[in-house]
Amino acid sequence: MSTSINVTQFKTAVSELPSEYLLTELERMQNALHHLERSNAEMLAQDASDADFLLACKENEQVMGRTRIRMQLIAAELKLRHAHEIRQELEGVHL
């Protein structure tokens, strides 16, 4: 049974969090990806035919895929907010 939230729930949660938190979360996720990628490389370098290593690498790849999707959703939310802020600033500017 999976305890992770679905994409819709994640998007809703992201929309309610402050931008500063989202930026910190992006950094944390990027760091997590780096460690998972390194872990996979180390396991495969040690023994690319080990069934346990291959299973762990597959699981890591799945986690990395979900993490990348979440990072994209956070980035999209931040871009949306930024665009909204720019529109608000430009409303008072007469060109």
Image (cartoon, rainbow, N blue to C red):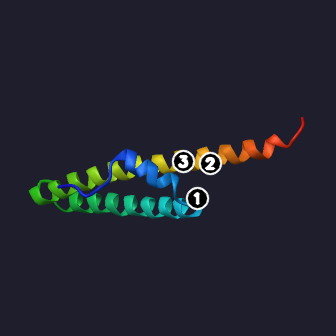
Q: Amino acid at mark 3?
A: Glu
Label 2 to label 1: alpha-carbon separation: 8 Å
Q: Residues within 10 Å of mark 3 (few under 14, many from 20)?
A: some
Quadrant where the C terminus sits is top right
Quadrant where the N terminus sits is bottom left
Dot 2 or dot 1: first in sequence order is 1
Which dot marks residue 77? 3
Q: Residue beneath label 2, please?
A: 81
Residue 59: which quarter of the image?
bottom left
Does the residue at mark 3 contact the one at mark 2 (Cβ under 8 Å)?
Answer: yes
Q: Which one is in front, 72 or 94? A: 94
Secondary element at image label 3:
helix
Q: Amino acid at mark 2?
A: Arg
Q: Residue beneath label 1, please?
A: 19
How many numbered circles are shown?
A: 3
Does the residue at mark 2 contact the one at mark 1 (Cβ under 8 Å)?
Answer: yes
Relative to 80, is 11 on the left or the right? left
Q: Residue at x 21, y 51 (%)?
A: 58
